[in-house]
Image (cartoon, rainbow, N blue to C red):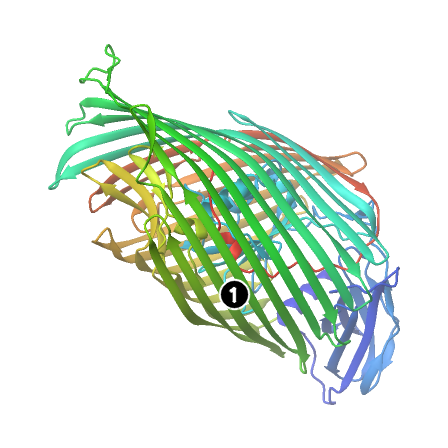
């Protein structure tokens, strides 16, 4: 039966042709033993004579299904759904015209534990025609790790030294959590993901070509992180705790609970993480005058950080009747984090003789708070699947950062062993209280209208309004008196985006068609108060998408998609304040960033659900990229973002997922891509290209008596970051083991991450006046012990809708990331 179901899903209705006219149809309803509708149940129409599959359908949001266009005759139905036992109907003679069968009631599957569906047997990777799905709990080595660790080893995903996420070698990824954008900049998103326990995650959906229903943001696609949500009736939940030991200790905890009775559903998830670690950064910079080496800076920085992160998600769903649902959701995060930087920079002449040393002690104390509330509504308009949904969201970010940097220069006179050096008078001391406030208001309405012949029309509207206020008053100490520093700034930004979309999809026998168009109008105003500089932008863009899928056979499916997307600059990337490493090295925002646009084409082929091939091409203009700027006279190097160039990306990916033996399942992903950059950086012409590849491998072993094991890892070849930084090869190997305990309600996992400590970032750049080498390693060699316990009992309930109106803005907030 499983093979029949897979064949049905991959071919989009398999049937036999006869001489008679196919004018029969059958309809009915699927409910659970509480008489509540079962959503997305798979209904198969089987011929009575030989049990051959004729057609299949899914039940809609009211549990109803309809199958049409087949020859009259004797048939029976097979009905299945996740969490329920498969049910077979009686054999029935279905005549020409419409036929109705009695209500089909499904019982909870015996494979549930205390009412909680066991998900550990799901495959690690699921390749679908429109996305790749990673089932987080299927991997033992995900236990005791973070959400960032999970992404880093997901197919096609790359994370660079600063936490920037790219997909199949292409930058500009939109990251969502539970179908809601995070609104975070790359650095703050990295920080949040490193403080989010993998134990809280259910799935990671990777979509390289989203439909018009989604926001157009994300040049290379969308990564949707789905957190765990219990769908059982009654009271039930899950508790997980991990102790992680690297060089520094770490601890993650999560408690998820759900209570559903009658028309009311209450759910919540609390997490607490303590994360302590370090980052070793080595920078070697060569300065030139008229092409001749004038000086060399050798910088070694040790960054120690810790974070105490509390997060809470929850809400209430009220089922007013079988067709109407009202929902209230909320989330909040409080993260107290700090880092202390001890940086020593040797200032050498052209012959590497040390002339002086700068010792910098820099501290950052941040309190990062985020809160959000969502009101949602869903109304099923008729039994054929017409549906209206609406969302209102308010999200706020409040960050208070306290910084101080003390830079002391020592004159060493070439002797660094016997002579500790003479302190140069007037050390450079800088401090700043840097508050940041971001408020986001968003609303959307979506409408679904089923059409004849398996067609569907979707349409909707969305508006968002964002206000950011970033003040950065810096002071420096001179003769015992604090004075305003020239780097002080105050940046206010307001943005309004209004969008309309329409999307059509239909299935014509073996051919699937989807086409959509999204229009987005953006009005933005920026004001640097201190410098009294303003800008205003008003532009309207159209984003078409088109998809074709063809079921060549029961085992083979082809797909073709094209689309246009946009990547707007993050709010914090536009904030011009500086984050100091020492007086020679800092990071700075750029308020004049423009959006970048990309055109994407993908051709895919899936065989038996095991092999998946994808050929893709992307053309991007006005790339927003991190670059390094260098002032040779002041010996200062700083990192910022600019629209530097255009790029072309051509890639081919291959994945293979299969249960080789009863106890052994393997998943392999390989991606090769060619990147070419062309543009202007620091007024110098940029021409750079490179072929790179990456391989992810995961082997899972399941033994008797609840034992399991895993070996996984990835390797990345030399690659380009932003066109000017060459990253050297990097890889990692992980080991894991697990054991079911406490009558299968509990799980113990042991995870060894990077036991050989081989994962580190090494890179260099030699472009124009830049000559820089980078070596970076962090507290990545870790052992984690994780305990999970499932409690409560209940029965499968209708899925609640967990999407919001937020569609782009939340991924564009920022602060400092950590390793």
Label 1: which secondary element = strand
Residue 664, can we see it?
no
**Observer-nearest of 76 and 275:** 275
The 10 Å Cα crowd at callout 1, few under 14, some 14 to 19, many 20 or more, is many
Q: Answer above or below: position of 235 versus 427.
A: below
Residue 476, can we see it?
yes
**Observer-nearest of 554 and 745:** 745
**In which image quadrant can residue 672 be found?**
bottom left
Residue lying furthest top in this view?
418
Q: Residue at x 39, y 47 (%)?
A: 490
**Residue 362, position as x, y percentages in the image:** 39, 28
**Observer-nearest of 527 and 137:** 527
Q: Residue at x 64, y 48 (%)?
A: 331
* Residue under pointer 1: 605
On screen, residue 643 versus residue 86, left or right, reads left
**Residue 613, position as x, y percentages in the image:** 49, 61
Q: Answer above or below: position of 598 versus 691.
A: below
**Residue 347, position as x, y percentages in the image:** 22, 27
On screen, residue 40 versus residue 99, left or right, reads left
**In which image quadrant can residue 601 be found?**
bottom left
**Observer-nearest of 234 and 813:** 813
Q: Residue at x 53, y 27 (%)?
A: 246
Image quadrant in which the N terminus is located = bottom right
On screen, residue 478 versus residue 449, left or right, reads left
């Amino acid at each position: 039966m499983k093979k029949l179901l897979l064949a049905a899903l991959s071919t989009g209705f398999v049937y036999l042709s006869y001489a008679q006219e196919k004018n029969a149809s059958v309809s009915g309803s699927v409910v659970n033993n509480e008489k509540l509708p079962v959503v997305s149940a798979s209904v198969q129409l089987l011929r009575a004579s030989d049990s051959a599959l004729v057609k299949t359908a899914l039940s809609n949001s009211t549990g109803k299904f309809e199958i049409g266009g087949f020859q009259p005759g004797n048939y029976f139905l097979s009905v299945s759904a996740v969490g329920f036992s498969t049910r077979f109907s009686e054999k029935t003679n279905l005549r020409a015209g419409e036929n109705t069968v009695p209500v089909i009631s499904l019982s909870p599957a015996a494979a549930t534990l205390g009412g909680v569906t066991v998900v550990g047997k799901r495959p690690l990777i699921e390749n679908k025609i429109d996305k790749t799905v990673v089932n987080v709990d299927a991997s033992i080595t995900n236990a005791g790790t973070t959400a960032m660790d999970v992404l880093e080893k997901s197919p096609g995903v790359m994370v660079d030294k600063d936490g920037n996420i790219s997909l199949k070698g292409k930058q500009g990824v939109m990251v969502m959590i539970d179908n809601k954008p995070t609104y975070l900049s790359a650095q703050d998103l990295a920080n949040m993901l490193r403080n989010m326990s993998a134990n809280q995650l259910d799935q990671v959906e990777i979509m390289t070509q989203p439909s018009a229903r989604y926001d157009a943001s994300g040049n290379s696609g969308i990564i949707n992180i789905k957190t765990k949500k219990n769908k059982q009736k009654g009271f039930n939940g899950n508790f997980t705790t991990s102790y992680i030991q690297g060089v520094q200790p770490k601890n993650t905890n999560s408690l998820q609970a759900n209570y559903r009775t009658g028309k009311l559903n209450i759910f919540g998830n609390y997490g607490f993480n303590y994360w302590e670690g370090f980052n070793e950064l080595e920078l070697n910079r060569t300065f030139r005058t008229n092409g001749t080496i004038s000086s060399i800076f050798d910088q070694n920085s040790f960054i120690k950080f810790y974070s105490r992160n509390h997060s809470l998600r929850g809400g209430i769903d009220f089922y007013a009747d079988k067709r109407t649902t009202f929902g209230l959701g909320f989330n909040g995060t409080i993260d107290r984090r700090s880092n202390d930087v001890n940086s020593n920079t040797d200032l050498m002449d052209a012959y590497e003789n040390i002339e002086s040393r700068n010792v910098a002690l820099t501290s950052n104390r941040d309190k990062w708070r985020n809160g959000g509330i969502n009101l949602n509504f869903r109304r099923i308009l008729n039994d054929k699947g017409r549906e209206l949904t609406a969302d209102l969201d308010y999200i706020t970010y409040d960050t208070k950062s306290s910084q101080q940097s003390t830079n002391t220069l020592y004159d060493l006179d070439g002797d660094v062993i016997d002579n500790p050096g003479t302190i140069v008078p007037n050390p450079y001391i800088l401090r700043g209280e840097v508050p940041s406030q971001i408020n986001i208001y968003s609303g959307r309405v979506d409408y679904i209208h089923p059409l004849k012949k398996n067609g569907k029309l979707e349409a909707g509207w969305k508006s968002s309004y964002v206000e950011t206020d970033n003040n950065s008053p810096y002071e420096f100490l001179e003769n015992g008196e604090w004075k305003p520093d020239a780097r002080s700034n105050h940046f206010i930004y307001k943005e309004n985006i209004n969008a309309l979309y329409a999307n059509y999809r239909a299935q014509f026998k073996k051919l699937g068609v989807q086409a959509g168009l999204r229009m987005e109008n953006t009005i933005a105003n920026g004001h640097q108060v201190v410098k009294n500089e303003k800008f205003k932008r008003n532009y309207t863009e159209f984003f078409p998408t088109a998809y074709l899928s063809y079921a060549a056979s029961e085992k083979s499916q082809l797909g073709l998609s094209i689309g246009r997307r946009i990547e707007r600059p993050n709010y914090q990337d536009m904030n011009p304040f500086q984050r100091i490493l020492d007086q020679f090295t800092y990071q700075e925002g750029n308020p004049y960033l423009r959006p970048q646009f990309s055109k994407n084409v993908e051709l895919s082929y899936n065989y038996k659900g095991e092999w998946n091939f994808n050929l893709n091409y992307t053309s991007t203009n006005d790339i927003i990229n991190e670059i390094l700027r260098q002032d040779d006279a002041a010996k200062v190097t700083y990192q910022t973002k600019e629209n530097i160039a255009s790029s072309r990306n051509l890639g081919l990916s291959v994945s293979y997922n299969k249960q080789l033996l009863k106890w052994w399942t393997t998943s392999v992903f390989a991606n090769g891509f060619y990147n070419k950059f062309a543009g202007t950086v620091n007024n110098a012409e940029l021409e750079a290209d490179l072929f790179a590849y990456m391989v992810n491998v995961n082997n899972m072993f399941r033994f008797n008596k609840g034992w399991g094991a895993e070996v996984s890892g990835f390797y990345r070849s030399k690659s380009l970051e932003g066109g000017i930084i060459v990253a050297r090869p990097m890889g990692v190997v992980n080991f894991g083991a697990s054991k079911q305990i406490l009558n299968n309600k509990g799980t113990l996992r042991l995870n060894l991450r990077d036991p050989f400590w081989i994962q580190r970032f090494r890179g260099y750049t030699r472009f124009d006046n830049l000559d820089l080498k980078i070596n970076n390693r962090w507290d990545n060699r870790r052992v984690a012990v994780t305990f999970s316990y499932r409690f409560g009992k209940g029965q499968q309930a209708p899925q609640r809708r967990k999407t919001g109106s937020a569609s782009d803005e939340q991924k564009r907030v920022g602060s400092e990331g950590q390793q």
